[in-house]
Image (cartoon, coloured by chain):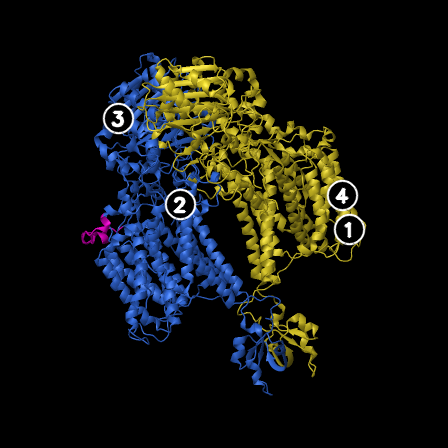
Chain colours: A yellow, B blue
Amino acid sequence: TEMKLPGQEESDLSSASENVPTGELDSGPGSGLSPDGPLDIDSRELEVPKDPPLFIQLNELLGWPHAPEWKETGRWVLFEEKLEVGAGRWSAPHVPTVALPSLQKLRSLLAKGLVLLDCPALSLQELAEQVIRVESLSPELRGKLKALLLQRPQHLIQTPCISPCWGSAHSREASQEEEAPLKEQHQNPRRQKFPAGAEAGAVLAGQLGFLEQPLGVFVRLQDPVVLGPLIEVPLPSRFFCLLLGPPTLGRGYHEMGRAVAILLSDLQFQWRVRRASSLHDLLAALDAFLEEVTVLPPGRWDPTARIPPPKRLPSEHKRLPSQLRVAKGPSLRRRTPAEDRHGRRQRAANPELRRTGRKASWYPSDFLDALHPQCFSAVLYIYLATITNAITFGGLLGEATDGAQGVLESFLGTAVTGAAFCLTAGQPLTILSSTGPVLVFERLLFSFSRDHSLDYLPFRLWVGIWVAIFCLVLVATEASVLVRYFTRFTEEGFCALISLIFIYDAVGKMLTLTRAYPIQRPGSPTYGCLCQYPDPGGNESQWTSTNPKDRDDIDLGLVNASLLPPPECAQRGGHPRGPSCHTVPDVAFFSILLFLTSFLFAMALKHIKTSRFFPSVVRKMLGDFSSVLAILLGCGLDAFLGLATPKLMVPREFKPTLPGRGWLVSPFGANPWWLSVAAALPALLLSILIFMDQQITGVILNRAEYRLRKGAGFHLDLFCVAVLMPLTSALGLPWYVSATVISLAHMDSLRRESRACAPGEAPSFLGIREQRLTGLAVFILTGISIFLAPILKFIPMPLLYGIFLYMGVTAISSIQFTKRVQLLLIPAKHQPDLLFLRHVPLSRVHLFTAIQLACLGLLWIIKSTPAAIIFPIMLLGLVGVRKALEWVFSPQELLWLDELMPEKERSIPESGVEPECSFSGSDSEDSELMYQPKAPEINISVN
Amino acid sequence: TEMKLPGQEESDLSSASENVPTGELDSGPGSGLSPDGPLDIDSRELEVPKDPPLFIQLNELLGWPHAPEWKETGRWVLFEEKLEVGAGRWSAPHVPTVALPSLQKLRSLLAKGLVLLDCPALSLQELAEQVIRVESLSPELRGKLKALLLQRPQHLIQTPCISPCWGSAHSREASQEEEAPLKEQHQNPRRQKFPAGAEAGAVLAGQLGFLEQPLGVFVRLQDPVVLGPLIEVPLPSRFFCLLLGPPTLGRGYHEMGRAVAILLSDLQFQWRVRRASSLHDLLAALDAFLEEVTVLPPGRWDPTARIPPPKRLPSEHKRLPSQLRVAKGPSLRRRTPAEDRHGRRQRAANPELRRTGRKASWYPSDFLDALHPQCFSAVLYIYLATITNAITFGGLLGEATDGAQGVLESFLGTAVTGAAFCLTAGQPLTILSSTGPVLVFERLLFSFSRDHSLDYLPFRLWVGIWVAIFCLVLVATEASVLVRYFTRFTEEGFCALISLIFIYDAVGKMLTLTRAYPIQRPGSPTYGCLCQYPDPGGNESQWTSTNPKDRDDIDLGLVNASLLPPPECAQRGGHPRGPSCHTVPDVAFFSILLFLTSFLFAMALKHIKTSRFFPSVVRKMLGDFSSVLAILLGCGLDAFLGLATPKLMVPREFKPTLPGRGWLVSPFGANPWWLSVAAALPALLLSILIFMDQQITGVILNRAEYRLRKGAGFHLDLFCVAVLMPLTSALGLPWYVSATVISLAHMDSLRRESRACAPGEAPSFLGIREQRLTGLAVFILTGISIFLAPILKFIPMPLLYGIFLYMGVTAISSIQFTKRVQLLLIPAKHQPDLLFLRHVPLSRVHLFTAIQLACLGLLWIIKSTPAAIIFPIMLLGLVGVRKALEWVFSPQELLWLDELMPEKERSIPESGVEPECSFSGSDSEDSELMYQPKAPEINISVN
């Protein structure tokens, strides 16, 4: 799953091509429809009286004078949909634009027209009676007009079949007296889009030859009434507007009709008109609208161009009528800077970091809340992601520790610790997993103990015990509060290092393979292999020297030989002889092909998710299961060709991978007793690592934008991880901490969204199904999967390396740091319109990036030296470097590029946060901040 | 080089992310600056008096009351650039937007302010004197104001260094009396952007505490005057506007200043204000502007969002003052539909298809026009593309004809025919080359003659002679006029078939390789190879049976053996024995890797061209030479690993590839005499093919949008091709016709563009350097390259297959047909806003696509049967199918999806072309058509 970064705030327009609905996590409040009515979020915050959502339809009078008929040519909820007359389809929703004169003409037409507020009509018939009472009309004309109004309009009803079909209303035009909503209206699939209480507004416009002067009628009905077949969906209408006139104005009536519709679709105008008591109020509302419009100059903008809906709408609460604004006063002032910029609450004030003890009260609901079909698909998705993780990390761990742990341990450990954590943790949405940093540390620890001839598993047991002790101390001292010092700088350094290690390891493993399966060059003397049988003459000594370098040895002389392959040769009592007996050809290059295939295929599937192809369900499936599908494809290819590629090693029985050990690790083994004390030193390092890995994940998961209701549990989570530590160590299982990405994917698969949303509007995010059951089910399934060994042994290792490369590349390309590195390569004039580039000089941005690169280089160098094992301390050193940056960069710059550390945050006077505040003044600058995507910085693709 | 399709008219906004300047060929007229002044193209067409371009700068008064200073915070030519105060850089150019009230406040301020038209001031000093004579000011305030006006403003001068630096004007603030333009102003690199005669407009705005009421001054200078350091570039100013007031309005003055600047940057407003003689005229111009503005509703649009410049500006001639419009009357009416939609002139009226005899008069200029440095880089680029083509086609031709022709013939033929064509042809920009269709035909002809045991080259000679005769008959009967029946349907069918053959062949060749170099599976008994020497006992008979299937044979018994590799074994008099002696391991997979590498690398480089990375020069280089770089990379990889991959076969001496033949092909060889007559039959087919290939290319190259001045020569070109035919046939060289893509690339590398363009505006296209010298130079270089053989023999064949795959994929993905096939996979609501989707029902679009697919399938089936050789007739059959489509689709639909055939075009009454005409009426619908990219449909990537 991919999430947007705060740095990705290219103007909504430039990223419009990505505007295809995806499962992104960052859909912000929005101000549109939702089951709770419009102004969903804002209204809750501001206690504005809720108005029902309004569907506006423009029926246009066409075909005058020969065969006048009404045709629906436009509709609005938030955005405009236009009827493509030739193509017989609705356009994509787009931002409505209108020429200024249309609005002005509309104003003057309404000013001298008929305005009925709180009209008591109860049917279209009654409404028509009211409407035709215009002074200027003769009784004859009134009759003609009424007949015209009652004529059934043509709707383009988008039936569920793919090609649009015209509603059959056209054919039944005769039965005009029918008032009840038609079958087509009820069957209209759009109807389900509207929440209960939604109302409609009908706009009728066009040229009418028998009128001598323009006719403008605006009606607000006392009670909303279903106006027969006037509206394509059987919603009760609240507003009715009629704009007809002689054909002198041409398309002017169409444009005026659009102008009325656009006005009515504006929430502020609607609010005012619902409360208007006179023509004057109506015109005042129109003028208030005009006060706020933005103008596009004619020579620079093609008026027929359609602007796709912006990802984020301007906040409505800024546009509230002033009486409401004043009433709410202080709460409308600027938010705290940290919240504004990065969508996080200030951590100092974050209740998640305080002891609350409220967790227990949620426990029953943690199971009841899971009773939703969405949870099934979440379980399947996360289960597949978890076992992919378990297989890949298990495979790598097996290699890193020379088989001391393996895939079986990985499955068992994941299942046991994961299930235990889900049952007890403070934040049960977290998924425990092997993680990159711990894998790296484990590899270092293993090479250390191998270099010093230590018995690895017992040594590791003591490390685990000490880590548990240290972590419990951290819990007791409430050290989780230190999390506030982990700014984006630290997170990015951590993430970038781990990603680079993934990439480096994946490529490195592949190169190792080509050494194990050497490539046969024409010059290299790798030809020749025969099966030599014991000679009757018996020069057995020859068998020992098979060095192909020795050219003399190549001449065998008279031998008793066959051409059997080496294994069969050995069976028959012979001895394979010759350099090519020991090489397996073709495997090296085929492995590279498999590696590239799985990597590129997974990347391609991930991109499909944001493409336009296929229905969104299919797209989401392909994207979510990209790595599973890539593994399946690779396995198929491998099985088809049947080459002896190196495969995943899986034990055939339920016993530890390392031959000859029981499940329980002996506490000392071959190690001296003092090693159990000395283990405290590496344990200290590992504790730092686990603390950082666990808490950075915790911070990301508990961000305010996910709207978790049940609160977090930083201390409780660390406590659980600490308690599980000695358990896994004693059983020789891997160590587990919270895995950022898989947990985010878990939350993403459980997100609740409003269903009823206007066309073009992104569905609004309501929260996460917070419960313990999905996680538990995932880990029970993982436990059962231990018996998958007969299938798993067909997975070639190069495939897994490819998936690791994919994970590394995805993770590193998702952080803002990477975007800034890319900026180094982009000439200034082609740079995207990033928000921080608007506010920080480019040279300062580059300096910040360069410092991060230098830190990363230093960490990499340390990781490559014998001192590698201390790299957790160096990671912690990033916090220090970040602190030192306060001398180099101004707080404002750090606020844009990173975020502020706790003390600094308080030290800046509120007004001084933005250097241009005094200059710009400025609502406009401020409002930019409202539309920033609020999403986590770190995104490591799961599975 | 990539070109946009007419179908790609997604709204300018949705494709905004692609808006990075590239070397695309489709930059249309535009209405902006050019060396000929603004309104470049339109003005030439409409003879509007030309106004000089205007640079508008907004200087804002900041820092009042402590340290008031002027700072440049915005600038305009066509689009707005905003100063990012915090970042100290200019924003990217964007469409200026302004709030409506700012325009209205500006209007009322000007209405009661001071308006000086034709002010005779000659310096800033004099101007300041004039400006301060406002009644409401006391003499003391006038002095303060004058001092303020003379204060030097701060400019952000973008020096050529990457990071922006503040101009040093700041430090020299003391010397305020200086009037001459400053050094920084002269050094400003933007200065070169402006053509001679460009003028400036200075807008000064801000809050000024000592004023009691707002002050608005608008000055039009009689003669433009350099106003000292007021403007960042030393352009003479024509307009001056001062908007100051008490600090009650806040940012209002800034916004009013922007409003004035936006007004002045509008060409129509400018036109009116230059001719205004009173305040009334000024206000009328403002009102006329307001009449035309488009309005964005406040709730749906964030006013701070920036709209990137549209690719195509609205046409200014629609907005001309009415007096001019009336004067030009008829020419402003709708253009002919064919021209509107597809940017082609109606072919019936196309002078290129008439005999003119004008060509000779251009001949001297065809050499003189080449004296421009641009021609050098064009020669290099096209030379590399040509030899890549010669190598790839030569290699494929060698395989297709079993070595009857080869790379040497390809080089020689390309050089000789190309040079001859360049010297004599009617359109010397055309590059002759082997093309896909001819290659396919040659392969079919060869297998035909092999199947019937004919002597190929003599048979081919007669085919060539007959083709020449047929083509000359076509020339004599002026059959090129038939070209008008080749609509987009035919072009796409032709292009798609050829592309698919490329893709199919490339992949097929790779699979053939894996048969030649079998993969060694563990089960397959390919182990074992020894070198057996003649046994003293002498059972020589064993040598003959080395069938590895025969298991008994594997047991050799007592042999005299060594493990020498096969070649050495044979040298020493031994015999290689065993299945693995005959296999070359690793080559198959490595070939696949090379194939994929060259394909993916070339694709990636092509995409870099449209990315944001690297300066545009580097990007263009990488994109243009993508296949050359891919070949170099592949060769390097191949040389590094040193595997025995199959390499390109190049003769070491200058003699025909086929051993034992002289350069001249004997007229009969081993064939019976009557075959020379029978050859007329395949020749007829080949003539059709050559006619279609040659003329489709000719039509594309001579499209109106390339603005060729010297005219085309359809008949002459076909004549040249026909004459070269027997020549190449007699020498056993390949046959040559015009190659679409390489010729388009040639034209592209010779395009002339206006340099002086406004920020954000695409450079406007002026024409092509039409001459004969570049082509001639390319072919002379190609001739010299015949002696490159020692280098060429290092090129592995899989690389060339990869490049062929790249060419096929690029070609097929560039036609509208492919976009329509993709539409089949895209759900209706995610489909891009293509123009034909607005006007043709989706089901009809899909039907059209399905018919094309069926035709393609039929062509493919015919190509695969023994009747394959008649496929040129089937290609011609596409024209018939297209004709038959007129019964299935309405002319309107065909107009949107294809184009009309000559008779039909005339048969449609002008008013009936669009079904919705009567309904929409409608300037707005019409104007959409103006912004369609005008570019060729077919795009086969070169090199």
Mark number displayed over residue B242 = none
Q: Is residue A856 left or right of residue A433?
A: left
Badge 3 sits on which subunit?
B
* B807, above or below B103, in the image: below
Q: Residue A256: image x %, image y %?
A: 38, 24
Q: Which residues are magenta?
A: B351-371
Q: What residue is disc 2 on?
A: B616
User: Which mark is in front, 2 or 3?
Assistant: 3
Secondary structure category for the residue under label 1 = helix
Q: Residue B709: image x %, image y %?
A: 24, 47
Image marks 2 and 3: residues in contact by CB distance under 8 Å? no
Q: What residue is disc 3 on?
A: B274
Q: Callout 3 environment at 10 Å: few (<14), some (14 to 19), or many (20+)?
A: some
Q: For the residues tagged 2 and 1, is the chain the same?
A: no
Q: Earlier in the sequence, mark 4 or mark 1?
A: 1
Q: Residue B456: image x %, image y %?
A: 35, 71
Q: Residue furthest bottom?
A: B537
Secondary structure category for the residue under label 3 = helix
> Residue flagged by tag 2: what amino acid is it?
Ser
- Does B354 appear in magenta? yes
Q: What residue is disc 4 on?
A: A466
Q: Callout 4 environment at 10 Å: few (<14), some (14 to 19), or many (20+)?
A: many
Badge 4 sits on which subunit?
A
Q: Residue B471: image x %, image y %?
A: 26, 61
Image marks 1 and 3: residues in contact by CB distance under 8 Å? no
Q: Earlier in the sequence, mark 2 or mark 3?
A: 3
> Residue flagged by tag 3: what amino acid is it?
Arg
Q: Residue at x 74, y 41 (%)?
A: A420
Residue nearer the viewer, B348 or B649: B348
Mark number displayed over residue A458 = 1
**Mark 2 to mark 1: distance in Å?**
61 Å
Answer with the quarter of the image where residue A777 lies.
top right
